[in-house]
């Protein structure tokens, strides 16, 4: 080792260490950048919201209710309806022919609407029908005969 190198080493040893650490220096710019990005993003959003409110003529800060969309009825064939109810497709066809379960025929094709099937599972009656005690008793007696 040269004398100049030894002198530099001795001078560095007597000098206190710098207060900054490498880990802090690498984290600080990332945290600062993330904070600045959030600040700019929020400011731009606020300005855009104000400008759109002025152009459209209504307040965008309050959320508007979602429009109600009517869903198209979901239909299934007799086999799928039978799987839902745990019976065969032949039973489903018999119930439709007897009027116990509403069904829609298109030639030989039978389709059952999912909402009507759900109603049938809940009450045992076709949708839209209500049963009095007398009607239920009559239906039970007819099945026993």
Image: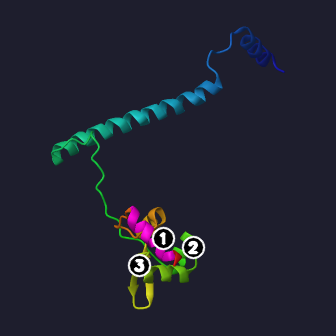
Query: Compared with residue 25, is residue 74 higher up or lower down, i.e. above or below?
Result: below
Secondary structure beneath disc 2? helix
Q: Nearer the viewer, residue 7 or 81?
A: 81
How far separated are the C-alphas under marks 3 and 2? 20 Å
Residue 142 in the figure: left or right of residue 71: right
Mark 1–mark 2 Cα distance, whole angstroms, equals 25 Å
Q: How is the image coloured?
A: rainbow
Magenta stretch prevailing secondary structure: helix
Q: Which residue is mark 3?
A: 99
Left/right of residue 48 with respect to residue 103 in the rendered view: left
Q: Quadrant of the N terminus?
A: top right
Label annotation for residue 14: none
Query: Seen from this angle, which residue lies furthest bottom?
Result: 107
Q: Residue furthest right?
A: 1
- Residue at 52% x, 30% y is 31
Q: Is residue 142 left or right of residue 13?
A: left
Q: Earlier in the sequence, mark 3 or mark 2?
A: 2
Instruction: Give the x, y percent position of residue 68.
Output: 30, 57
Quadrant housing residue 47: top left
Q: Which residue is mark 2?
A: 83
Nearer to me, 24 or 60 = 60
* In the image, residue 50 above or below residue 6: below
Per the rendering, the mark at residue 140 is 1
* Residue 8 horizontal/vertical position (percent): 74, 15
Left or right position of 133 against 58 = right
Question: Is label 1 in a helix, a strand or a loop?
Answer: helix
Mark 3 crowd level (few <14, some 14–19, many ≥20, 10 Å Cα): few
To which quarter of the image does residue 86 belong? bottom right
**How far across and down, in percent of the image, does residue 33 sit?**
48, 34
- Mark 3 falls on what kind of element? loop
């Amino acid at each position: 080792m040269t004398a100049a190198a030894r002198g530099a080493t001795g001078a560095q040893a007597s000098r206190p260490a710098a207060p900054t650490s490498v880990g802090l220096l690498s984290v600080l710019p990332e945290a600062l950048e993330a904070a600045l990005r959030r600040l700019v993003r929020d400011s731009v959003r606020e300005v855009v919201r104000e400008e759109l409110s002025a152009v459209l003529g209504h307040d965008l800060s309050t959320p508007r209710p979602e429009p109600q969309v009517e869903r198209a009825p979901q239909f299934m064939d007799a086999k799928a309806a039978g799987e839902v109810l745990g019976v065969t497709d032949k039973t489903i066809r018999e119930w439709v022919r007897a009027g116990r379960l509403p069904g829609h025929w298109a030639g030989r094709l039978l389709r059952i609407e999912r909402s009507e099937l759900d109603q049938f599972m809940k009450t045992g009656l076709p949708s839209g029908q209500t049963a009095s005690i007398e009607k239920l008793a009559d239906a039970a007696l007819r099945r026993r005969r």
